[in-house]
Amino acid sequence: MTDHTATGIQILDDKLGGGFTRPAAILLFSDHPSEKRLFAEQFVITGVRAGERCLYVDFFRAPQLARRELTKFGAFDERLAVFVDATSAQLLIPSTERYAIHEMGDLDHIMDTVERAIRETKPARVVVDSMEFLADRFPKDAVFRRWRQLLEVGKQEGATVSYLFLNWTYGQTEVERIEDMSDYVVEFQSRMRTGVLQHFLRIRHSGGEGVQTNWIPYTFKELVGLTVYFPRILVTGPFNAGKSTVVRALCKDTVSVDRLGTTVAFDYGNIEVMGLEAEVFGTPGQERFDFVFQIFAREVNGILLVIDGTRAEDLVRAKQIRELAGRNVPTVVLANNADLPGQLSPDEIRSRLDLGAEVPVVRTIATEGQGITEALRLLAEMILGLR
Amino acid sequence: MEERPLTQAPSSLYDLFPSHFSLLVSGPPGVGKFEWIAGLARAYLERGERVVFVTLDMHPREVRERARAVGLDLGKYEGTGFLFVDSYSATASEKPEDAGGKKVYSVASYSNLEGLGMAISKAAVDLKPPIRVVFYTISTLFLHNPPAAIGKFFQIVTNRVKTNIGFIAYAVHEGVHDPLTMNLLRSLVDGVVELRFNDAMDREVRAHHLRGISLKSEWRPFAGGMA
């Protein structure tokens, strides 16, 4: 049996050594409305697909609706997804579930029912959607006492118990108490920028591994699930370094606005690898197109800086481009044309570009696709704060 | 700013509100808050603005019917300039609204304030801000959530709408909430529109405390949605 429960987000699971440890208590927190329920649902579906039994305690949806909604992730074995129906009683309709809460005003009855479901079904994963339903309705001390007990039962039965919590009514002290009870704290945020909704999550605390991340932008795709999503990765560098070739090597389908083989507006492509999705923009390298560059350099997630690894004379321009984009934007340098004679040494590249130790230099042969995925993975890890 | 007289045609009152503004529409049950709000939606839709209707008290079908009674045919706009956020159907264990393939954002529980907040944002993104949001009614939330939670919800949604979405008008029943709650709600919006019955049982409307708008706040007859 695994001692980890995967989240289904590959790059995150890799860093967590396979997922959250099991057993564990996981707080899925937000201070404002967010899309964290998708993460919890994916957590359940990922478990079910791995053949694990999962328990979903739902205060906001009747189980028949929840089951229907879960199919947005694709087909799954419904026998492995067990529900505690905490909604039908609110709607005054009868429940057909084996585990149902009948008296919504009785905290002990609610928690006893959830604990009984955990003891009897011995799930690998539990999702409680959500804790604020209880926090907003019952005395604080009773909620904390019963919550500790629930987490204890979860640990005894070997379950990873996750609970959504949107803080409507608690103060900072109570929120900290909840965090203290949790082995992991995953925080969520949804922002609206220029008419688009963007979703982010970050691991703020993890007991064992000490993994923390930056805000990770993510998106949801029907039948696919949660994907880490970078709306803007820039592929840039001096003239003729191989930027368009890098974009083509990264992306299945690309669009290039070029003239006689030289990019004059931009290359565009979309990447889907390693559970990552990104929009990739390749900018022209010539100085007269710096205005295009400056448009694309706004709000970039990260930069792949492509240089020709044999041309020292281009590095002044490369350094200039990096400064134009801002030195604190996560950047990976691709020393391209690694198959040609006359390679600059890594030290020479580093000193001429004035790179800090945090900036990796990767040798690539863009025409053959070599080193490109590695460079992207490094960049993704830098953006996510996993390096 | 020069004081503008408030005439009895509601459309002129509707014209007062800037694209980014928040409003509480209060009055006793039955005084015509729905009519007033439907009239507001109609005025905006007719001049090409986009509207989201958040319904907690009625099935979307009923909203369509009652809107028609005030001269607003929502079918004409639905999907392109108009969307429902439906927090009624699933909660009333009716079949979730299926508007013949038209998209409706449904929230399955009155207690799911997070889901409600996200549904408003998603509907707004769908229609492309700036848009006008009408919320009918905030009072219903109080039957299912503690006031402190609604207070924070109200504050967050109002801020989010004003910063990123545009305009929101919340209907609230007068006389069912305690004065503290009403004061809290009033303090969190840019202005208040009140509806009442006068001694002759005629309906009257007034707007007051409109932030940034100078206006004589006198009671005027309210003729209903047929402006």
Image (cartoon, coloured by chain):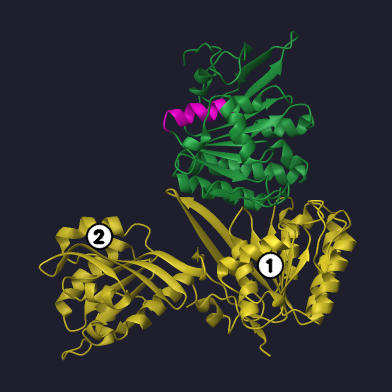
Task: Tell me the element at label 1.
Answer: strand
Looking at the image, residue A183 sits to the left or right of residue A294; the answer is right
Q: Residues within 10 Å of mark 1 (few under 14, many from 20)?
A: many
Residue at image position (82%, 69%) is A98
Task: Determine whether label 2 and label 1 are within 8 Å by CB.
Answer: no
Residue B28 horizontal side relative to residue B71, left or right: right
Chain colored yellow: A
Q: Which residue is mark 2?
A: A293
Query: What residue is disc 1 on?
Result: A27
Q: Which secondary structure lies at badge 2? A: helix
Q: Within 10 Å of the Cα at label 2, are there few (<14), some (14-19), or many (20+) other Cα atoms?
A: many
Q: Position of residue B45 (x, y in %)?
A: 47, 31
Type of the residue with mark 2: Phe
Q: Colour of chain B?
A: green
Name the residue at the top extreme.
B200
Q: Residue at x 80, y 81 (%)?
A: A157
Q: Eyeballing the image, is B49 above or below A293?
A: above
- Magenta stretch contains residue B39: yes
Q: Main secondary structure of the magenta part?
A: helix
Q: Earlier in the sequence, mark 2 or mark 1?
A: 1
The segment highlighted magenta reads B38-48
* Alpha-carbon span between mark 2 and mark 1: 41 Å
